[in-house]
Image: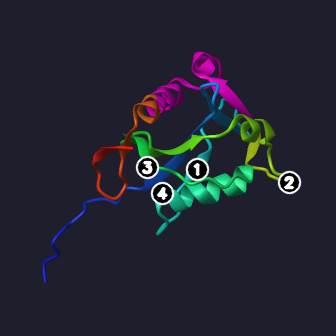
Amino acid sequence: MIPLCIEPFAVDRRIDVSVLVRDPQRRVLMVQPAGRDDFVLPGGSVHPDESLAQAAARLLAYDLGMHRTTEGVLVRDRRPACFDTDTTEMLHVVLDGGTMTTADAGALSLPVGGQAVKTLTWVSLSDLPKRARAHTEARVRAAYVAACSGLRLRADAGQFCAA
């Protein structure tokens, strides 16, 4: 029997998910992972057979002790594999974590004994260049605009819809 699809080489793929959480002062929640000097949106790698929403919930709970429901995909971007540099293909998806109240945002702290995140902070869009690398800044800005416009990409349908 002849196979329907023949792949000449295997490609490693990675899916990362992060969550855009806002506060009433128009800032976004960002974390500084252990071992890094820049800030990123909270999140990480999606496990096999795990949905984006499940991964986001697991990562927020583990890294920040936070329980939030996500409300759709704001941004997705893809880095292709590069065989010359042995770079893995990566899909990065940003989910909408909504807006926290001022009281909840002020009470947020890292869980005792957590090791994945060094610190967390609320960052205004004007301070993003000081805190994040250029590709992270672009991703956060695009997600923020999508969140404020009410557009979401339904993860199951692949189409934008008004929230």
Q: Position of residue 31 (x, y in %)?
A: 68, 37
Label located before the other in sequence (3 or 2): 3
Instruction: Mark 3 vs mark 4: give the one in front.
Output: 3
Q: Quadrant of residue 162?
A: top left
Label located before the other in sequence (2 or 1): 1
Q: Secondary structure at mark 4?
A: helix
Q: Which residue is mark 3?
A: 72
Q: Secondary structure at mark 2?
A: loop
**Dot 2 amino acid type:** Gly
Q: Which residue is mark 1?
A: 44
Instruction: Mark 4 vs mark 1: give the one in front.
Output: 4
Left/right of residue 64 with respect to residue 88 in the rendered view: right
Q: CA distance from mark 1 to mark 3?
A: 17 Å
Q: Which residue is mark 4?
A: 52
Q: Which residue is mark 2?
A: 113
Residue at image x 76%, y 38%? 103
